[in-house]
Amino acid sequence: MVKMNWTAGTQCVAKGNNKKAKSGELVYHKGDILTIVDAKKGYYKARHNTTGEEGFINSTNVRERKALRVDPNLSLMPWFHGKISGSEAVCKLQPAENGLFLVRESIRHPGDYVLCVSVSGEVIHYRVIYQDNKLTIDNKQYFYNLIDMIEYYSRSKGSIATVLMKPKEKQGTKSAELELSKTGWLLDIAKLTLRENIGEGEFGAVYEGEYMGQRVAVKIIKCDVTAQAFLQETAVMTKLQHKNLVQLLGVILDKGLHIVTELMTKGNLVNFLRTRGRSVVNFLQLLRFALDVCEGMEYLESKKLVHRDLAARNVLVSEDSVAKVSDFGLTKVGSKETDKVKLPIKWTAPEALKKEKFSTKSDVWSYGVLLWEIFSYGRQPYPKMSLNEVKEKVEGGYRMEAPEECPPSIHSLMRLCWQQEPRRRPGFSKLREKLEQEMSKVSPGPTAECREVFSSASRC
């Protein structure tokens, strides 16, 4: 028997059911995610990630949920061979086998694709036309992406000669579905119920949903290229676990990529502050939010990860009013030129704007702007200034004045973050220490009771 060496915090996937649990044991079903809370010689105590219940488990009936490797060969479309000719496709689909298939880029019709399928010893080439942001072979059935199309023709032959049976994988690629399943991050679409749309992002829609009884947020990315890029970045999220980072629960591959995270019921921090204001949110809670974000960023700093888009809109607030950094694994997708156009100018450090030098210290600059957002109760930074004015004035040494009623000590902290020279800016650990000192001036300590009182008030 393999000796388990798990510690508290280790996540596990149930290999089977334990419906008839004995006294003190945890009830779970195959595929459920459990977190070890106590590991002593001879037994493990775990918490069910969905129900929150705790109990003892049999270590032989669970397997460790491992982080997904950030591997450029990990592919959502291992059957996609890129720009190859029809004759090359025929060679790759040998020996001929009914239902063996691949997809290639069309050389004759740039922007279109070709589905190549082996049937009765021959290879048939179906042109996949891209029109009105959708794909079609027969002008009857339309698809948002290639993944969607392949899934459909794997269930029904429709207007092609045979159901797709077996993908011909491009040499060197690894199936994302297989890797996600092996590591325990692949979730079951049948157990997900989607509810209302709660947001539209640049790369896809976000829905509230329920997964095995747990309320979740689901980001759905339908574009093949974007989904592939996000898969690489999502792999980063499988390595991270912190109370002030939005937790990834898993990934679903169905008509694109579904990224499933914990649901943050009170929305993003900027809207939270704007809709409640000074009458509900007191100075102590503002400090608490600032410290929450700082602790999450300190953890990312310790992992040598750079966020690149830290702002109040990318901080979410939980039901119990804890602020958590989101999109920390999802760095910008696309070329450098595209990045430059889309950079959030008001939050981006001068060296990142001019030379695209992103680092923890450029995140610290952004954190200074986020502090200004928090203590102004969600106002837009650099009010009444155009983006060009912001770039020009900041480069010339201009820094924002303190928000109304913001203590000088907090404004000094912002100005520390806005040092022109990146090396002169403090790290997140130093910022945390300074914020803790501010907390101690206002209150003997940030108590759970204080947060609970605020949480109740903010629901009014």
Image (tube, helix red, strand yellow):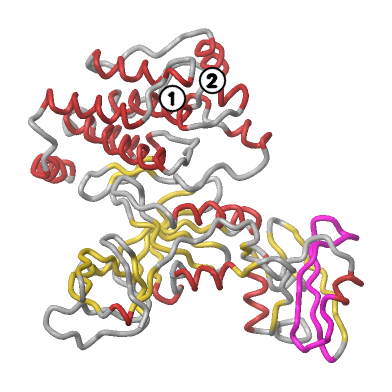
Considering only order in the chain, which callout, 1 or 2, is on the residue closer to the N terminus? 2
Assign a secondary structure to mark 2.
helix
The residues tagged by marks 2 and 1 sit, at their Cα atoms, a distance apart of 9 Å
Viewer-closest of 47 and 406: 47
Q: Residues within 10 Å of mark 1 (few under 14, many from 20)?
A: many
The x and y percentages for residue 267 are 33, 45
- Vertical side of 208 occupied by 439: above or below: above
Viewer-closest of 302 and 26: 302
Circles 2 and 1: CB distance less than 8 Å?
A: yes
Residue under the point 40% across and 67% down: 65
Quarter of the figure with residue 270: top left
Q: Amino acid at mark 1?
A: Trp
- Vertical side of 117 occupied by 12: above or below: above
Viewer-closest of 10 and 133: 10
- Vertical side of 91 occupied by 392: above or below: above
Q: Which span is picked out in magenta?
A: 92-120
Q: Residues within 10 Å of mark 2 (few under 14, many from 20)?
A: many
